[in-house]
Every structure is written in C-alpha cells, then in structure tokens.
Amino acid sequence: MSQPASLPSAPARPAGRAMTAEELFRLPDDGWRHALVRGELQKMTPAGFRHGAVIMNVAVPLGQHVKNRRLGVVCGAETGFVLARSPDTVLAPDIAFVQQERIAATGQPVTFWEGAPDLAVEVTSPGDTRPEVKRKVTAWLSAGTRLVWVVDPGRATVAVHEPGVATRLLSASDVLDGSPLLPGFRLPIADILA
C-alpha cells in the first residue's frame, strides 16, 4: 500500500541507531502492526476475526459509558502510547482509556499520547505466551497505567491487574467492574466473550 501524501516518509536511520517514536509515527503503511520497544521496531501480524469481535464487545459499551458520563476518551486498537524515551518505547493496547482531566491539561495530540493510558485492555491471541502477556502488563503498570484488563477468549477469562493489588481472575459467570476508575461501568464477562 502506498504512503499517504500528507505524511512525510521516515528518514533513513543509520544502522544500529534506535528508532524514535516520531520515526515510528511517520512509517509508511506496510500492512503490518508495529510497536517500538527500547528503540527496536517490532512487527506483528494483523489480529484475527474473533480477536477483533471481542475488542468491540468491550470497546462499544465502554465507549458509550465514558462518553455519556464525560469521563474522558476511549481509543481503539493501534493507538500508540509513548511509555519511555531514549530509547523510545511505544505500545498500542487493543483498547485504551484516558481520563478527562489529563486530556483537558494537554489536549488530544495528533501523534502518539505521551505517557500511559489510565486503562489498557489487551485481548490475547492464540499464539500469545504467558510471559509475553506478563511483559505487556508489567510495561503498562510500570509506566503508570492504573488498570489493565487482559481478556483471554481461549480460557474464557478476564484478568484484572492494578498496581499493588493481587490479580483478580474473572470467569464467564462474573461481571467486570470498572470502579473506581470508571464509576458505574459493569460488563458481564459472558457479554465480552459472546
């Protein structure tokens, strides 16, 4: 796919030099999803159909709840968050939420959000390993994310991660509760996995 005319192409980098978040943002669309980890570009295959459906089962009710209560902004998959600089790390959760107070202070950037989201939602794919998922959760929490939900369609569970709190594992008969970060948000796990 050709690069849109409105975006300048990424300049060539000398071999061995770490890529920056700004260079990542200017990469042409090559059909892959990308992340940047400590300056190294990582390519990922596009998500499968079930993965995308599960994302929407969370994103739609979450987005409506946040918008109706003016709590902030919910971002879809592939929205980049700069978690570290020099070397840069840019990750993109499947769903993210940023509180209104933080947006009011900085505005909505055209490029990546500088810092972690308040909520990161990751939906596992069949090929994801437990160490990979744990690294992502650790990266989000270490960068300041207040709440991480890991939806595992294969195991029919949602793991709830918060800094300094034991992980809670919810099953299909449970209800996901967003309080206190998302007051009043409740979503049956069965609806997520439907």
Image (cartoon, helix red, strand yellow):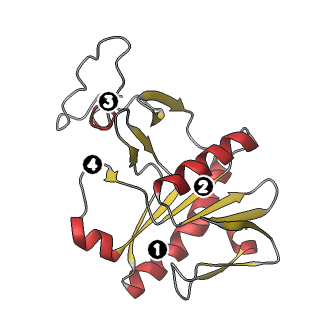
Residue extending farthest top: 15
Say left or right for 23 vs 8. Answer: right
Q: Residues within 10 Å of mark 2 (few under 14, many from 20)?
A: many
In the rendered structure, which amino acid carries the disc numbered 1? Gly
Q: Which image quadrant is residue 156 in?
A: bottom right
Marks 2 and 3, how far apart at CA: 25 Å
Residue 21 sits above or below residue 159 on the image: above
The residue type indicated by label 4 comes to Thr
Q: Which mark is residue 122?
A: 2
The residue wearing badge 3 is 28
Q: How far apart are labels 4 and 2 at the CA level? A: 21 Å
Q: Earlier in the sequence, mark 1 or mark 4?
A: 1
Callout 1: SS: helix
Q: Earlier in the sequence, mark 4 or mark 3?
A: 3
Q: CA distance from mark 1 to mark 4?
A: 21 Å
Q: Earlier in the sequence, mark 2 or mark 1?
A: 1
Q: Position of residue 190 (x, y in %)?
A: 76, 73
Residue count near mark 3 (Cα–Cα under 10 Å), binned few <14, some 14–19, many ≥20: some
Single out the mark in the foreground, 2 or 1. 2
**The disc labelled 2 sits on which kind of residue?**
Glu
Q: Are marks 4 and 2 in contact (CB under 8 Å)?
A: no
Residue to which mark 4 is pinned:
111
